[in-house]
Amino acid sequence: MLQARLNPRDIANALPDLPRWVEIRSMLLSNRANVFGLDLDAAPTPSFAVVKHDVGVVGAPNPKAILEAVQHSGEAAIVLAVPENLALVEAALPHWISERAALHTLASLNRLPEVPPGIVRLLEPGETTSLKNAPEDLYAELADAVVDGAAIAAAFADGQPVSFCYAGSETEGLWDISIDTLEPYWRQDHAARCVAFQIARYRERGKAPVWGSLRSNLASARLAAKLGFVEVDEIYVLTPPPSF
């Protein structure tokens, strides 16, 4: 199956800027995505599989396109589906594990905490290389975010960055919240202040936050509710079996 030759940005424009498409549209808008099995005339949305770091499936593309996108990722990527095409994606990827992810948007600013000056700031270029206290997987995640051009906000305690927030995905009007906090500093409001700081930054650019939380991540859902987010939609995240 041939890879789509249409400019990925043109494909992004065929999808509405909604929370369920924030990651997929961000891939396309980056101009570093590859698209397989494109059918722009499919209804009610186009059909295709897209891959950047991860894979997203829109509409009902040929299952071979989904497999090609997964193979093109070159790694055990996650695959994003929506409720309408979940059965198709699961059939194309037998033995993969699917999990619901609730999508939230901010209903009110009133629950966001104040951020005292100096408590949260953007990390300087290269500063992530000095995060010796971060677990290896978090360090790798932040390093990848820097490569993708993300501006990482950090909340500080004891003179060290302990909570990190950045846009995992970004479109014309939305940004997807990625938030991590070092375990010794959980439940101390560092994450809440870090998120509030970034929400204020992105509001100045006219962009609203999207908070996605996996069904298994109850702490994430609780924090979202505490900060004034409400569930508006859902997607599904598929991960490969251990032997992949």
Image (spheres, rainbow, N blue to C red):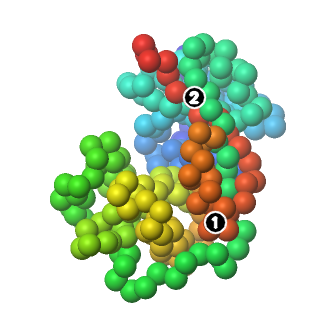
Residue type at the position of mark 2: Leu
Which residue lies at the image location 66% right of the left edge and 61% below the top edge? 225
Label 1, label 2: how many angstroms apart (C-alpha)? Answer: 27 Å
Q: Is residue 156 visible?
A: yes
Judged left or right of residue 195, residue 83 is right
Which residue lies at the image location 55% right of the left edge and 78% below the top edge? 113
Q: Is residue 80 above or below residue 88?
A: below
Q: Is residue 144 visible?
A: no
Q: Which mark is residue 238?
A: 2
Q: Is residue 39 above or below residue 120?
A: above
Q: Residues within 10 Å of mark 2 (few under 14, many from 20)?
A: many
Image marks 1 and 2: residues in contact by CB distance under 8 Å: no
Q: Is residue 211 above or below residue 190?
A: above
Which percent across, then down, holds residue 38? 63, 29
Which percent across, then down, holds residue 90? 65, 20
Q: Is residue 61 above or below residue 215?
A: above
Which residue lies at the image location 62% right of the left edge and 57% below the top edge? 222
Q: Nearer the viewer, residue 184 or 59?
A: 184
Which percent across, then down, holds residue 150? 39, 59
| Quadrant of the rendered image containing residue 52 | top left
Of marks 1 and 2, the one in the foreground:
1
Which percent across, then down, holds residue 36? 56, 26
Judged left or right of residue 5, residue 105 is right
Q: Earlier in the sequence, mark 1 or mark 2?
A: 1
Determine the residue located farthest toward the right in the rendered image.
44
Residue under pointer 1: 226
Secondary structure at badge 2 equals strand
Residue type at the position of mark 1: Lys
Q: Which mark is residue 244?
A: none
Secondary structure at badge 1 equals helix
- Which quarter of the figure is the C terminus placed in? top left
